[in-house]
Amino acid sequence: MKTIVTGGAGFIGSALVRKLIKSLEYEVMVLDSLTYASQMDSLEEVSESELFSFSETDICDSNSLIEIYETFQPDFVFNLAAETHVDRSIDSPELFLKTNIIGTFSLLEVSLKYWRHLDATSKDKFRFLHISTDEVFGDLKENEPPFKETNNYDPSSPYSASKASSDHLVRAWHRTYNLPVLLSNCSNNYGPFQFTEKLIPLMIVSALRGLKLPIYGNGKQIRDWLFVDDHADALIKIIHEGLVGESYNIGASCEKTNLEVVEEICNVLDETQDTKPNGIKSFKELISFVDDRPGHDQRYAIDSSKINKELGWHAVESFQSGLRKTVDWYCEAIEKLPYQGERIGKSRE
């Protein structure tokens, strides 16, 4: 199978690319504009494969997309290209609207024109999977049930509003033009190669450098955590077996407060690091609290029963095992990781 992965040098995209090439031996074309969050190192283990190719392309560039589609002739398209950091969307929303809305529109238009000119067999095989977030649903009260695919959208930030808009576009291109699309909405991801301004890698890297571990508000905000390799497996399952036009929630039923997550990171580091910075006895001594983020959602939780029952996908990694793998990876990679400077003072999800 010939597969395009947009945003394939990003955190989730690169995990998917590695699985597509190493496990399925699919021919993969990565499209990525190589923003600050892209990491070509995350593709190093497949970059020499004859199944791998790369194009530094912005998904808003329709002319480049047309040329790539015509030359590569994809069977599948995974759209993971997006601006994703909530705090950045609050500071600079315009880029989020451009990439997440206009970029998705460009991909849909090019995909539709390409699909319409395929022969009948190739038309039946073609799939466009749009990867989104649980944040489009807004937030939940403590006792409310997790988000189902049928929940109303209620985004809180410019980031989640732009992703909600892109989801609506994908559904519209299916209903209006019959483009064979699928959608997924995932919970918070973590794992190796995640950019270091996200909560878990930021806390690991900050702790190893002896810096404060700043947590928004009281740290009681709840997130549902999903190991990135489990997410990649779910995406592959959806594009092969999902029903066209359907959306699937992907989560691991692993709700934890931000404070609990940071404390568990400190516990792992306390166990594994013989030498601690600045004379501290426990990494928990570095935990601090900062002013809360504007419009901060209090709780996300995903109901994955649909993908569990209909497609037979279940998360394999527990939070404890996944976190240990993640901490070990960052401890080994610490010297090569970028320093976030002024941005390291905030915990980002």
Image (cartoon, rainbow, N blue to C red):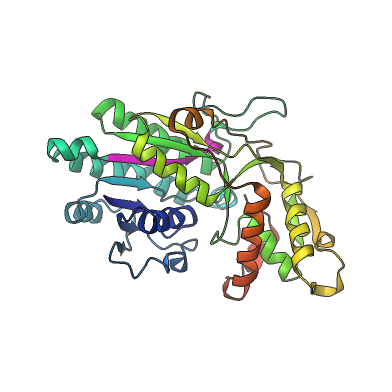
Confirm whether residue 198 shows in the render.
yes
> Is 86 left or right of 112, judged from the image as shown?
right
The percent coordinates of residue 157 (x first, y second) are 57, 40
157 shown above or below 309: below
Q: Residue at x 80, y 56 (%)?
A: 288
Q: Is residue 42 left or right of residue 155?
A: left
Magenta stretch, main secondary structure class: strand
Task: Please determine whether, in this image, residue 283 is positioned above or below residue 240.
Answer: below
The image position of residue 309, as x and y in percent, is 49, 28
Expressed as whole percent of the image width and height from the top left, the position of residue 230 reads: 52, 47
Q: Residue at x 46, y 48 (%)?
A: 232
The residue closer to the viewer here, 336 or 84, is 336
Residue range of the region highlighted in magenta in the rendering: 127-136
Camera-nearest residue between 31 and 3: 3
Q: Decide: is 256 above or below 286.
A: above
Q: Is residue 130 magenta?
A: yes
- Could you say where residue 338 lies in the image, as x and y percent from the top left? 57, 70
Magenta segment includes 245: no
Number of numbered markers: 0
Q: Which quadrant of the view contains residue 113?
A: top left
- Position of residue 212 relative to residue 80, above or below, is below
**Residue shown at the point (16%, 37%) measured from the top left:** 121
